[in-house]
Image (tube, rainbow, N blue to C red):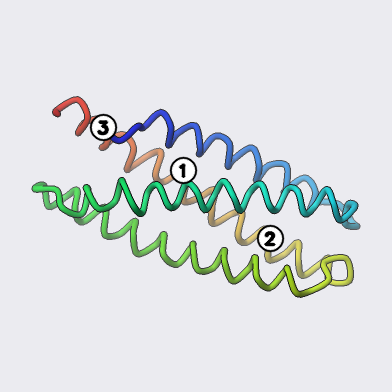
Amino acid sequence: MYRIAKLRDEHTRLIAMVGRLNVVIAADAPPPDVELQTLRLNLATTLIGHLQSEDWLLYPDLLNNSDPRIVLLARRFCAEMGDLSKTFLNYSERWMKVPIGENWTDFCRETRAITDALIERIEREDRLLYPLLGTLDQAA
């Protein structure tokens, strides 16, 4: 019903991308622009696609569920996701305009904050939301 395997696969890919980006930002100096831009583009594309799947397919069903616990959890995740989406878009737009190499420390600090928030979100969905979806799928 909810294609949990697909959502979990996207989480796995996002975690791997974040891991590669975190290795890059742990360095004292930026990598070549092409390498960094490729990492950032792949992360942004995958993340935006994943969030759209959740926004358009998953959460509308959960918000209309007859179980108030499911609705409450879905509302909480929607509210948090909206903030993360906006934060990520603002971060992406900012660093398209600002020379990263000249602001490496700031870029690394902001990137770490974004990647930490994303990993926390993924872990919470995997721990709280996706098991619930598995239960709903079995009941259907």
Q: Nearer the viewer, residue 75 or 38?
A: 38
Q: Earlier in the sequence, mark 3 or mark 1?
A: 3
Mark 1 belongs to which amino acid? Glu
Quarter location, residue 97 = bottom right
Tell me the residue that label 2 is attached to.
111
Q: Residue at x 54, y 50 (%)?
A: 47
Q: Is residue 74 left or right of residue 22?
A: left
SS category of the residue bearing label 2: helix
Report the disc number at residue 10: none
SS category of the residue bearing label 3: loop
Q: Residue at x 8, y 48 (%)?
A: 66
Label 2–label 1 contact, CB within 8 A: no
Tell me the residue that label 3 is attached to.
1
Q: Is residue 139 above or below residue 122?
A: above
Q: Earlier in the sequence, mark 2 or mark 1?
A: 2
Give the residue at the far top of this rendering: 138
Q: Is residue 95 above or below residue 40?
A: below
Look at discs 2 and 3 and give the one toward the viewer.
3
Q: Circle 3: is it few (<14), some (14-19), or many (20+) Cα within 10 Å?
A: few
SS category of the residue bearing label 1: helix
Q: Earlier in the sequence, mark 2 or mark 3?
A: 3
Look at discs 3 and 1 and give the one toward the viewer.
3
Q: Residue at x 22, y 48 (%)?
A: 62
Label 3–label 1 contact, CB within 8 A: no
Q: Is residue 73 left or right of residue 77?
A: left
Tell me the residue that label 1 is attached to.
123
Mark 2 belongs to which amino acid? Thr
- Residue 49 location in percent, x, y? 50, 48
Q: Is residue 15 above or below residue 4?
A: below
The C terminus, quarter of image: top left
Q: Circle 2: is it few (<14), some (14-19), or many (20+) Cα within 10 Å?
A: many
Mark 3 belongs to which amino acid? Met
